[in-house]
Each structure stands twice: as C-alpha cells, then as structure tokens.
Amino acid sequence: QVQLVESGGGLVQAEGSLRLSCVVSGRTLSSPAMVWFRQAPGKEREFVATISGSGVTTYYADSVKGRFTISRDNAKNTVYLQMNSLKPEDTAVYYCAAREGIRAYTDISRYAYWGQGTQVTVSS
C-alpha cells in the first residue's frame, strides 16, 4: 500500500509564501511522477503542478506559473510545492498524488495514489 502525507499548509497573508511537502511511504514506487491539485469550496479539483519521475519535466497551471515551483527529492521520497506571491484565490485544500510511471500528466485520472490534503488559506 502506498501512503502520501502532505504538510506545510496554513494561514498566510496575500503576497506571502508557503512551502508544501508530500512524503510518499509504504510500497515502493519507482520514481513516480507526482502532482499537486487543489480544491476550493464549491469548486472542482483543479491541476496545479506536476513533475516527472526524474524531476526534469514540470508543468504548471497558467494561474500559478511564475509564482509556484514544484520540485522533488527522490532520496527522501518527497515532493515540494513552493508557493510565492500568494493570492486569496489560491485558498484551497491542496492534494498531492502519485502514479506508477515516470511521465508527468496534468490529467487527474492518471494518478492512483492520493494524500488527505492540506489546507492553504490566503487572507487579503
């Protein structure tokens, strides 16, 4: 069984920064592609950023491009999301997910393993 645990969420003022972490444990996945999604109240879960198993390839949603950075440390089985210049519209529960395979996708259906989420609240 694969477990993902997110951390690092919290309350921050607009223009502030947060760094989310997601640790993968349990059954070993071989360099899985990882993704961050988010879900705001009353809205569908939306793609934020993804990174390939090697860490070479990344994709970002247009709404976060230039402000968020996804990275990974395979030795620690951890993926990060550095969020800068946060806006109130970034408020959501942020979920990380993993897939068996190194190729990164923006499609939510490609990811089989999910964490429980961490709340990010940005005040104006």
Image: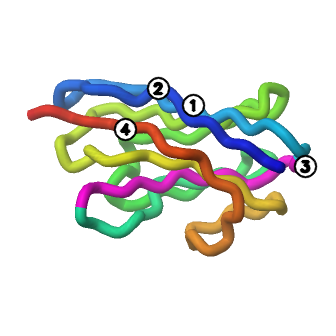
At label 4, which amino acid type do we have? Gln
Indicate yes or no whether the magenta region holds residue 30. yes
Q: Which mark is residue 119?
A: 4
The answer to which of 115 and 104 lies nearer the viewer is: 115
The outermost residue toward the front is: 1
Determine the CA span between mark 4 and mark 1. 12 Å
At label 3, which amino acid type do we have? Ser
What residue is drawn where x is 84% and y is 39%?
Answer: 26
List the residue tagged with mark 1: 21
Element type at mark 2 = loop
Element type at mark 1 = strand
| Dot 4 and dot 3 residues touching (CB under 8 Å) | no
The outermost residue toward the left is: 124
| Dot 4 and dot 2 residues touching (CB under 8 Å) | no
Q: Position of residue 24 (x, y in %)?
A: 74, 38
Q: Is residue 98 left or right of residue 32?
A: left
Where does the magenta region start and end? 29-41
| Dot 2 and dot 3 residues touching (CB under 8 Å) | no
| Dot 1 and dot 2 residues touching (CB under 8 Å) | yes
Return the disc, 4 or 2, that comes first in the chain's sequence: 2
At label 1, which amino acid type do we have? Ser
Return the disc, 1 or 2, that comes first in the chain's sequence: 2
What residue is drawn where x is 79% and y is 36%?
Answer: 25
Nearest to the eye among marks 4 and 1: give it. Answer: 4
Q: Quadrant of residue 46?
A: bottom left
List the residue tagged with mark 2: 8
